Amino acid sequence: MEGRNELLIRVYLVFFAFVLLAMIIISKVVKTALVEGEKWKAEGGKNIKLIDIEGERGNIYSEHGNLLATSLPYFDIKVDLLTSSDANFNKHILDLSLKLSQHFGSSPQHWENLLSKTRRDGKRGKNSNARYFSLLNKVTKEQLELLKTFPLFNLGRYKGGLLPERKTMRERPFKNLAERTIGKNRVNATNVGLEGSFNGVLKGGLEQRLMRRLPGDIWLPVQGPSEVVQDRGSDIVTTLDMHIQDIAHDELEQVLHANKAAKGVAIVMDVKTGGIKALVNLRANGKGAYVESYNDAVGTLSEPGSTFKLISSMVMMESGKVDLDTKVSMYGGKKKFYNLTMHDSEHHGTRSGTFKEAFAMSSNVGMGDTAFKIFGKNRDGWKAFYQGLKDLGVTTKTQIEINGERSPFVKDPSERKKDDPNNWSGTTVPWMAHGYELQMSPLQVLNIYNAVANDGKLMKPYLVTEMSKPDGENIKIRPQVLKQSIASPSTIMKAQELLKAVAESGTARGLKVDGLSFAGKTGTTRLEYWKESERKKYNASFAGYFPAENPKYSMIVVVYDPEGRDYYGARVAGPVFKNVMKRLSGYERRQEPRDVEEERKVVYAHYGHKASYKKVLDYMGYPYKSKGRGNWVEMESGDKKIMLNNKRISKSEVPDVRGKGLRDAVYILEALGMGVEVEGFGKVYKQSQKPGQEITNKNIKIYLK
């Protein structure tokens, strides 16, 4: 009996010991989970964490399928120099160093010393980076596959230590063309352009990757990068035509350089759809070049000046109180309204003429006085004028899908604040009538011109026509009509006649091209006209469409603050419009039939390598005479033979290689120590640095076609 009781006591003691132990464990669990939970989570987070990994970003294409932006994969190569055994490391280090030297530069001794020393220091605790040593950066996929075959690395991740880290970089194949419109995908800043507006469509799906912390605050993926599958973003197709974009960019850039302007804008729009075919924004960068750094076409408001006269004319014609042949006063080009005097660009002496004539000659006084007589004499008239602008769609945004558009600044006469300089006054109507006391963006002005070209139909300007998902689903974006007609059919027809008159007999008559027709309006805006300054500042602009009958494209050009002798819209902005029109109409490719014998005599003057010219001329049987001993000559056609004159190339100035073949252009530029980037095929038609300027930047890009 005593033995039985002793056994029971022992069982009870063991049982109570287990119960006590269980209670202690449970209390510890409860304390850890509930009382100290946040503390231990924080401790765990110091060494293990989940990070978001974004899938590959979608591509951006032009309307013809040209790739405008894409994500190119590359790899940063890390190596765990402590994971391999001493036997494997010592066996393969010499061969590995030799391979690295052959394919990635530096001497084998450099690689051997670097890797061996980092491994030794890591083992001694002197180098925390040995577990995640940065070996190479921005390695291509092909180079990574090659690295995997190198001695030691071919043993696998855990024996060889190779740790490739996959990354992507955004690349724009057309470089600076439409750079601000396509936009930028930035890590630590807001995305801009289409990259920003369509970020939700373009970005890939987010997945989480488990990372562990190594000594030295280095975070290493628990899984290899190749094991992580990421969802790709959708592609978008734009309305941009890179041929038109290139032409508009080239023509605008030349004018900006010639006039030393602060910046410039050029927009080409499809009349029927509102699709943007070209959107150029160039600003001086202070280094002699123009770059796309801000979307002024969409985001910058300014007083439009005389291009606004089309809009105010339509409001006047809609009132029924003025017609094309209505006699209006121009007062010789000078008229006082209350305490302010209005001037035409020149005191022409014309006292009066028809409304159409006043518009064609861009008379500020004629437009201002006519508007004042209809709308400017009382507050009811002011409200009627404002309502007329509102009916045309002038007071609202265009709704283009790209970020950054600001609402037009058009004063409302019903809103009046004490001592506010933006209140309406007796001079507001006449000054608004010729484009002052209000602000619009170039795109907002163009959209009204486009509506006139489109027989009154106001389209929503747009940049994206299609979104293509990775699963093959395509979402089409159709043209959108904002307003079936901005004015009555008769007013639209009269507005078209006004714009034709400007091109045929008015301020834009100097832009006429035989065989081509257009309609448009010049604009010259005085900046800060209320200030007295030594140098007056202006904006030069031209807005219009072509052909005049059945228009295909509308276009606006604005050149901001030109410093040259000319600042008028017809002579600064107008030539950009004219040349783009010519090139898009194929005018420069048209050739008149010529006599065959005459054709043989035509040799275009340009320069190149003397030996090459001699070889070609000998082969073709052309008589020629060579002067000078230099290697470079300028070829000119004489009366009876071709002259090869010695051509001197300055070593301190950027040479003009336009018109040259690729070989000659590259030879000349590289002989001057310049690095050359090439785009296109054929002959050079454009170069990134202006010919004749001092060589300060050793890198130059040439464009061929």
Image (cartoon, grey):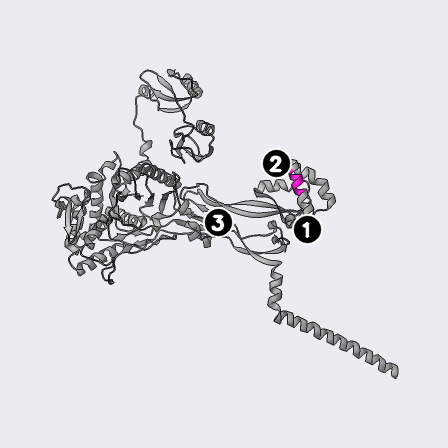
- The residue to which callout 2 is attached is 106
Q: Is residue 258 visible?
A: yes
Q: Which sits earlier in the primary sequence, circle 3 or circle 2?
A: 3
Dot 2 crowding, Cα within 10 Å, few <14, some 14–19, many 20+: few
Looking at the image, residue 564 sits to the left or right of residue 340; the answer is right
> Closer to the observer: label 3 or label 2?
2
Q: Are marks 3 and 2 in contact (CB under 8 Å)?
A: no
Residue type at mark 2 is Ser
Looking at the image, residue 77 sits to the left or right of residue 652; the answer is right
Residue type at mark 3 is Gly
Looking at the image, residue 537 sits to the left or right of residue 97; the answer is left
List the single residue furthest toward the bottom.
1
Q: CA distance from mark 3 to mark 1?
A: 44 Å
Q: Total label count?
A: 3
Q: Which sits earlier in the primary sequence, circle 3 or circle 1?
A: 3
For the C terminus, the image quarter is top left
Q: Secondary structure at mark 2?
A: loop
> Residue at 55% of width from left, 52% of height from top?
230
Looking at the image, residue 679 sits to the left or right of residue 120; the answer is left
* Magenta-drawn stretch contains 554: no
The residue closer to the viewer here, 597 or 11, is: 11
Residue type at mark 1 is Gly
The x, y position of residue 445, in whole percent, is 28, 49
Dot 1 crowding, Cα within 10 Å, few <14, some 14–19, many 20+: few
Q: Is residue 322 visible?
A: no
The x, y position of residue 483, in whole percent, is 29, 55
In the image, which residues are magenta? 110-115
For the N terminus, the image quarter is bottom right
Dot 3 crowding, Cα within 10 Å, few <14, some 14–19, many 20+: many
- The residue to which callout 3 is attached is 58
Mainly helix, strand or loop, the magenta region?
helix
**Residue 125 numbered mark, or none:** 1
